[in-house]
Image: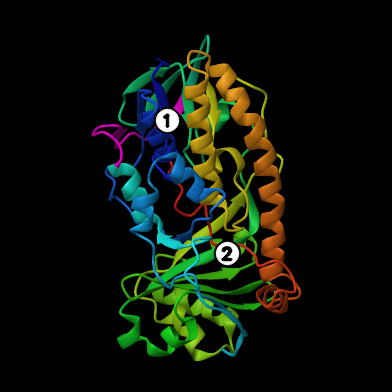
Amino acid sequence: MTTHVTIVGAGLGGLTLARVLHLHGVPVTVYDADASPDARAQGGQLDLHEHNGQRALEIAGLTEEFRSIIHEGGGAQRVLDQHGTVLAELLDDGSMARPEALRGDIRRILLESLPAHTVQWGKKLLFATPLGDGHHELSFADGSTVTTGILVGADGAWSKVRALLSDQKPAYAGMSYIDTYLQDVDERHPDAAAAVGNGAMYALVPGKGFLAHREAGNLIHTYVVLHRPAEWFADIDFTDADATRKRIAAEFEGWAPALLSLLTDGETGPVLRSIHRLPDGHRWTRVPGVTLLGDAAHLTVPGGEGANIAMLDAAELGDAIAAHSGDVEAAFTAYEEVMFRRSHAEAVAAHETIEQIFGDDAPHALVNAFNGVHQQPAEAHPGTASAAEA
């Protein structure tokens, strides 16, 4: 039997790893900073892809559970110009290639698949200290400590575990998302509902735009995207919701009222999601007893694959630990060799997706993709926005 595995971070990656280890009979504990599973919102919809996110859930034995939470019709997509004119549209054909589901529902089915007390809540990691021989001590904000011989950092963009392996820290990527919601949209916001349609909507010009998604429960979740320096956003008081809406809306003067209403009529306060990234080829020299997965390992710009590859990282790492029972270093080495290659390629692809959506040829590059001139892009959702940070 493999020694007890310690995971920091109860996001989709950390929970997928815990589930796969549980299936293999490997004891595991997950530590997370949140006070409870419902302590905060888990973000919007994700499209899980057959070759990574869905593959991870298959390895975790949760395919049927995933099928039960799919948002039917949510795979539709359309591109608009700033005047609200539909330039291209793809309907949801019911394919299982990239079905949509709420991040919170995916997290729920993972949590429900684990034994009680697998996740220890209210455990905010302050730092991890090497003890030698591959062992580490975790120090939490509540004053408690834990010693472990197998440590996995699944703690997102601002990972504390990463410091054991790498000196790299996320750098601002030059763009930020402002997150807002409309509720009861068919009755209360019919113009916005008509503009967005049944799935995802992209309204774009170079360097900015609206990414909106119709979600289950008659909601529209919108990311207002601006390429601006971090200092530009720092001058905005996001605690003043009305002033923030006006300031951001001023950047979209002349846009269609139905598009502006996605921001100005928002029924939740605007939330700033500053996008950060690690170097595209981020890697480290093997350090005994510890590794990373997901955003902790390879944070990049949002190209639609963040959650998907975090879950695949996790599933493959779980299988590697089980296959190399008693030799964690062999397991980590095998896992990292594949993960490093994949994450580098995905980071390059993510930059290409952002260029396609927000580059100098916006929105026409995306229209061409929808019309089959180029390969259809992944959705540019901010994959790091809901990453668990323990």
Tell me which amino acid carries mark 1: Ile
- Could you tell me which secondary element the residue under label 1 belongs to? strand
State the mark number for residue 7: 1
Q: Residues within 10 Å of mark 2 (few under 14, many from 20)?
A: many
Location of mark 2 (residue): 379
Which residues make up the magenta segment? Answer: 113-128
Measuring from the top left, give residue 276's x and y in whole percent.
Answer: 60, 51
Residue ranking furthest to the top: 133
- Could you tell me which secondary element the residue under label 2 belongs to? loop
Tell me which amino acid carries mark 2: Glu
Q: In percent of the image, x 38 and y 89: which residue is there? A: 190
Measuring from the top left, give residue 21's x and y in whole percent.
Answer: 41, 29
Viewer-proximal residue, 305 or 203? 305
Q: Which quarter of the picture shows residue 353?
A: bottom right
| Main secondary structure type of the part rendered in magenta | loop
Measuring from the top left, give residue 314's x and y in whole percent.
Answer: 49, 37
In this rendering, the answer to whether 32 lies above or below 171 is above
Question: Is 117 a magenta residue?
Answer: yes
**Foreground tag (1 vs 2):** 2
